[in-house]
Amino acid sequence: MSRFDIAALYRFARFAEPADLIAPLQDACEREDVRGTLLVASEGINGTIAGEGEGLRRALSAIGAITGLHHIDVTFSASEAMPFLRMKVKLKREIVTLGEAGVDPLQAVGTYVEARDWNALIANPDVLLIDVRNDYEHRIGTFEGAVDPETTSFRQFPAYVRTRLSGEKQRKVAMFCTGGIRCEKASALMLKEGFSEVYHLKGGILRYLEDVPQADSRWQGACFVFDERVAVGHGLEPDGRYRLCHGCRRPLTADDCLRPEFEEGVACHQCAGEMSDAQRASARERHRQTQIARARGKAHIGPEAQD
């Protein structure tokens, strides 16, 4: 059985004409049979892609050459199955959507903390530890003692900072997210809002789970990832306890799949009430086509990966 390598990557940079990068990046990845999603904007590149061994590495080298970025931050993991259905390069306003004008990680960003130094920082009871991810990501795993901002999208984070943290500006703040990119913008926002000491986990949870031995870890649970693996644990091994709802792209437990609202490939209890009849019918047809394609050994063009 083939083993697929997975590369989560991002880099903030200045692209004068990001649209010009779309076709070359698409061609470079497809040439190596690499799949996944790359987001390109005037502020840089972000994405997760997968392929077999040398093919993925050649694609990463091509991405560096096309963008002119030869030091892109990459975290590697692996899967026995291809976690993506297709390759898609998308032009975006932001490579991670905060929706806040004037927040630029290339101008100011918090202090990076290496995975090996993270435990010592967050063990300090005076440190405010914030999980920058969405609430459904936090629920299946987080660091011991972390605060959940209870956001359903990253766009809600600025309001959380201004309404819930306005009295904490002189406190030392430590933040973390999946691969580090959301913390780049979140820390830039907090510095702009007047916070004095802001730290964030370099490489995110993925780097921590890769580098820190489980015996020394302060991580609890699983880390949600936006692909068919759904969640990973220490050593970045897939955590088989979760499935992905293809309606809302949120993780589901075995018990969630027994609830009456759950329909395979269509919806779950978290999104069933939000879907119109037309959306439900479209999801059923998409699921039917996906099943046919998989039975034929082909990759059906399914839903796009989230940002």
Image (cartoon, helix red, strand yellow):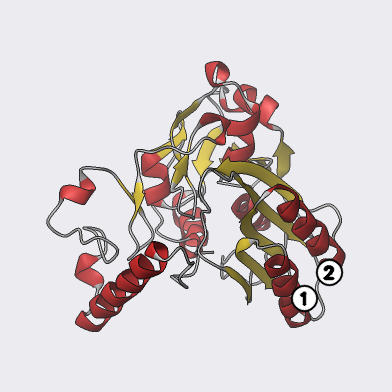
Indicate the amino acid at tag 1.
Pro
Of the 4 image quadrants, the one containing the N terminus is top right
Locate residue 109 relative to residue 231 in the image: left or right: right
274 to 114, vertically: above or below: below
Q: Residue at x 49, y 69 (%)?
A: 304
Residue that label 1 marks:
24
* Residue 140 locus on image (x, y percent): 38, 40
28 to 225, vertically: above or below: below
* Residue 284 locus on image (x, y percent): 26, 73
Q: Residue at x 35, y 44 (%)?
A: 242
Of the 4 image quadrants, the one containing the C terminus is bottom right
User: Does dot 1 land on a helix, a strand or a loop?
Assistant: helix
Residue that label 2 marks:
66
Q: Nearer the viewer, residue 179 or 79?
A: 79
* Residue 177 locus on image (x, y percent): 56, 46
Residue 171 seen in render: no
Give the residue at the far top of this rendering: 215
Locate residue 185 relative to residue 268 in the image: left or right: right
283 to 278, vertically: above or below: above
Indicate the amino acid at tag 2.
Ile
Q: Earlier in the sequence, mark 2 or mark 1?
A: 1
Q: Residue at x 81, y 63 (%)?
A: 62
